[in-house]
Amino acid sequence: MNDDSTDQNRPLHVAIIGAGSAAFAAAIQATKLGAKVSIIEADKRVGGTCVNVGCVPSKILIQAAKIAHETEQTAFPSIQIKSFDLNRSTLAKQIHQRVDELRVAKYENLLEDNPLIELIRGYAKFHNSNELHVELNEGGTLRLSPDKILIATGSRANIPPINGLDETPYWTSTEALFTETTPKSLIVIGASVVALEIAQAFLRLGSFVTLIARTTLLSNEDSAIGELLMATLQTEGMKVLTHSELESVCYINNQFKCTTTTGDELESEQILVATGRQANTHQLNLQAANVDTDHQGRIIVGNDLQTSQENVYAAGDCTQLPQFVYVAAAAGTRAGKNMVGGHAVLDLTTLPTVVFTDPQVATVGLTVKQAQEQGIPVISRKLDLEHVPRALANFNTTGFIQLVANESTEQLIGAQIVADVAGEMIQTAAIAVAQKMTITDLADTLFPYLTQVEGLKLCAQTFSQDVSQLSCCAG
Ligand SMILES: Cc1cc2nc3c(=O)[nH]c(=O)nc-3n(C[C@H](O)[C@H](O)[C@H](O)COP(=O)(O)OP(=O)(O)OC[C@H]3O[C@@H](n4cnc5c(N)ncnc54)[C@H](O)[C@@H]3O)c2cc1C
């Protein structure tokens, strides 16, 4: 089979490999600008990681676990709630249902409503930089010679080379999110976003969880964040082994038996491997297309999302860009525009991030260390949540707000927040950073009382005043 690429009056033809968030954002943008788009998807479902096996199901699980936790550990002893009774298969069904609804609303319906987008079900590989070969799911090979190609193939769970692991029925996040049973004991390998979010959810739903961290928790962040999170998880009952790695695993009599590099011998009913995500690029035959990758197989793109090959673009988790869905979508939109002759640039200088643990961890801009490394004269303040009226009213003062500013200009250049709703607070800080607000601008802004986000204003005020001297109505 061949597509027709000879008619000069035809619209520009864009082929997109993958049908996830980056792909859809690009397809919508490219068709708005008049292109015809072929999306090629190997999986039986469109939508990719976020809706099917990532952001959406994980946030539902985390919310369910939070409710379970609050029945057992209320901040209000005056209200005693009976302990929870978990029906895991009903929870799994509820997760599946919301995932299916969102996939239909946000992906499948878009395909039906846009006649300029065709979906090809199959696995695409490069034949050369202009030609793709698609092994169709229904059988046969389709050869496509589009004008432009976007690689949006996402990522998969990274599985470290641990002795014996491959012979065991270990979980990745996908199995963990949709399990219909709660293991009595769970070993979680990893200490970054996905590992921590799912580990805490399982702990709260009744598993005894042991977390194994190669170094510390969230080791790329300011060390105070990982320390506070570790203390909180330990208080909730998690066993946390830091500076440790799994050395070998075997599965005997429905039990995982493991040894660690630090000499621990552990047993559990299940293991979750959550040690990062690897770009899906190894089977694309990228060499044939002269598309360069880094040593981890991630596609190298410029801020216009073009690869080393002029007619080939890439966006999302398969690139070196940070692995967040809103980054994938923003990159896809810009790639969609640029493939049709635009000049859009992806600017990640103000990138807010959220880890949906409880407390949540949210950051934007630079930490003190990063600012110092860049030679920026830096000044910072850290406000514990016990100084934030809303946190006091909630009887939940675990966490802090840290603001980082340029000492010479007073301009806000970063914020790190640990708080139950840090994810809702960080966008205010992100806007302040993006708008180049000074600490004084932030301190003088009106914030409603009592909100958690008011803590940003209070923290800004501490650059010039002692927090203990502030009235709760300090305007
Ligand atoms: C458990 C978990 C929780 C997460 N939570 C969040 C969150 O809360 N917030 C957030 O911002 N991000 C979150 N993420 C990250 C987010 O899901 C990803 O960054 C995002 O989905 C990446 O989108 P993408 O378009 O790059 O790739 P994907 O959505 O993965 O899409 C890639 C598609 O390409 C297809 N494909 C691959 N190779 C081929 C081929 N050769 N031919 C045809 N098709 C192919 C795949 O089948 C897939 O459908 C989470 C991830 C996980 C795993």
Image (spheres, helix red, strand yellow):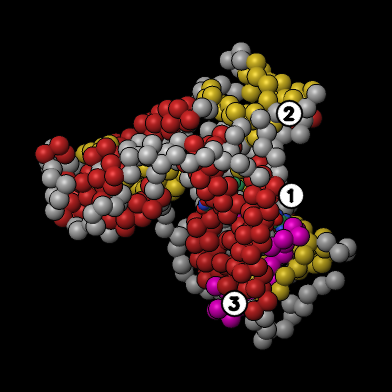
**Nearest the eye: 442 or 372:** 442
Categorize mark 1 by other alpha carbons within 10 Å: few (<14), some (14-19), many (20+).
few
Q: CA distance from mark 2 to mark 3?
A: 45 Å
Under circle 1, the secondary element is: loop
**Image: 225 above or below 149:** above
**Nearest the eye: 24 or 399:** 399
Q: Amino acid at mark 3?
A: Thr
Residues marked 2 and 3 touching at CB (< 8 Å): no
**Residue 103, horizontal then vertical, whole percent:** 64, 64
Mark in the foreground, 2 or 1: 2
**Residue 42, horizontal then vertical, whole percent:** 75, 58
Extreme right residue here?
139
Residue drawn 60% across and 28% down? 208
The residue stretch that appears in magenta: 29-50
**Residue 339, horizontal then vertical, whole percent:** 57, 69
Residue 370 visible at all: no
To which residue does mark 1 refer? Answer: 283
Q: Which mark is residue 165?
A: 2
**Nearest the eye: 344 or 324:** 324
Under circle 3, the secondary element is: helix
Q: Which of the marked residues, 1 or 3, is nearer the chain's N terminus?
A: 3
**Ligand 1 neighbours mark 1 (CB distance < 8 Å):** yes
To which residue does mark 3 refer? Answer: 31
Tally the marks.
Answer: 3
Residue drawn 15% across and 37% down? 468
Categorize mark 3 by other alpha carbons within 10 Å: few (<14), some (14-19), many (20+).
many
Residue drawn 71% across and 44% down? 180
Q: Which part of the image, by quadrant, shows the N terminus? A: bottom right
Q: Which of the marked residues, 2 or 1, is nearer the chain's N terminus?
A: 2
